[in-house]
Image: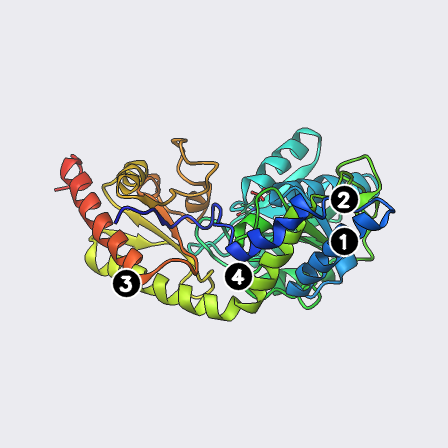
Amino acid sequence: MNKVIYLDNAATTRVSEEVVNAMIPYYTECYGNPSAVYTFAGEAKKAVTIARESIAKVINARPDEIYFTGGGSESDNWVLKAVIDKYGDAKGKHIITTSIEHHAILHTCEYLEKKGCSVTYVDVDEDGVVKLDELKAAIRPETVLISVMTANNEVGTIQPIEEIGKIAKENNILFHTDAVQAFGHIDIDVKKLNIDFLSASAHKINGPKGIGFMYIERSIKIGSFIHGGAQERQRRAGTLNVPAIVGFGKAAELAMANMEKNAKYETELRNHLVERILNEIPYSKFNGSTKNRLPNNANFSFKYVEGESMLILLDQKGICSSSGSACTSGSIDPSHVLTAMGIPDELAHGSIRLTLSYLNTLEEIDYTVDELKKIIERLREMSPLYK
Ligand SMILES: *Cc1c(COP(=O)(O)O)cnc(C)c1O
């Protein structure tokens, strides 16, 4: 096998051909600025409207509750900073989040803490599920926002979003969820789940990079994050990235139409992968919930091996994998998510994440397990700890 086996779909995905084809005319033909009044720009404007509708439908939102952004990180930054800006002085500057969020949330929280906000990082159990009793206990009169991700990017665990939405509503606290990993992969209904803000990104669902959105429930008033023109109902300035928005709309449409089919297929592949690894590789551990997890995510820890060494040797075999989030790879700290789940440092260091897509095949999975087996045997032979 000489081609690349891409098993890092939680980091980013291949843009599907249908998406690329949908985007091209908005670079070459309908390149007008959708804010312009002349007829020529009308096509671009119409395309944005259609994309907004496709995206809103996936989460049962209204199109006017969707605000396009530069991606998941921007959406996450926006909600945290804007809620504090708007409600901080009137109500308080306390945010509740979890210890396993993406760095777009965690590093924004750190920034806000330096600015005088207070943040509670609720713990998770050994499966990576947020502890609801701790979350409830963390609520204070000055709590303005609860932010809990829908599904974790490293271990794939899906959080009890419905329960958290209820807790937030009962306590009159705004609720944000980073759904970047979940959007288009699992069912999300923002109305049913009492979600006030939701972040998502196109490049995790076979769409282009650099385009995302935030859902903002329509009665909520928060300020703009990017100041300038009047785009996005004066809440996010900047000329709309029409081709990317069109691509995002197409990707959302495809993700929704194929959600069940893809989930079933990816679950089958993943179960095969997990079964073979646990059966054939000694001292291996599967991380995260077995029940409440994304269809495409598998995360393992192996005793007596180094995660980074596994990645490099897999790469030599043309296999793309990850030791966690793309932002932490290359660093020597073990993953903050695995640490929060109580996995000891030595074991967390020997972890890899394999994230699949509908484009992967059973043959690729078998090849990956065969190679991984050999790699781990080789690394263990060199390890002084392994006897
Ligand atoms: C990828 C990711 C992000 C960041 O999204 P970008 O569009 O790359 O900025 C945020 N949160 C989670 C959970 C992610 O997986």
Label placed on residue 43? 1
Q: Is residue 161 left or right of residue 355?
A: right
N-terminal label among 2 and 4:
2
N-terminal label among 2 and 3:
2
Query: Marks 4/3: CA distance?
Result: 22 Å
Q: Amino acid at mark 1?
A: Glu
The residue mark sitting in front, 4 or 3, is 4
Mark 2 crowd level (few <14, some 14–19, many ≥20, 10 Å Cα): many
**Residue positioned most to the front:** 29
Q: Amino acid at mark 3?
A: Glu
Q: What residue is pinned by disc 2?
A: 32
Query: Marks 2/4: CA distance?
Result: 33 Å
Q: Secondary structure at mark 2?
A: loop
Q: What residue is pinned by disc 4?
A: 185
- Residue at 41% x, 58% y: name it: 359
Q: Secondary structure at mark 1?
A: helix
The residue mark sitting in front, 1 or 4, is 1
Is residue 342 depicted above or below 57 in this figure?
above
Q: What residue is pinned by disc 3?
A: 275
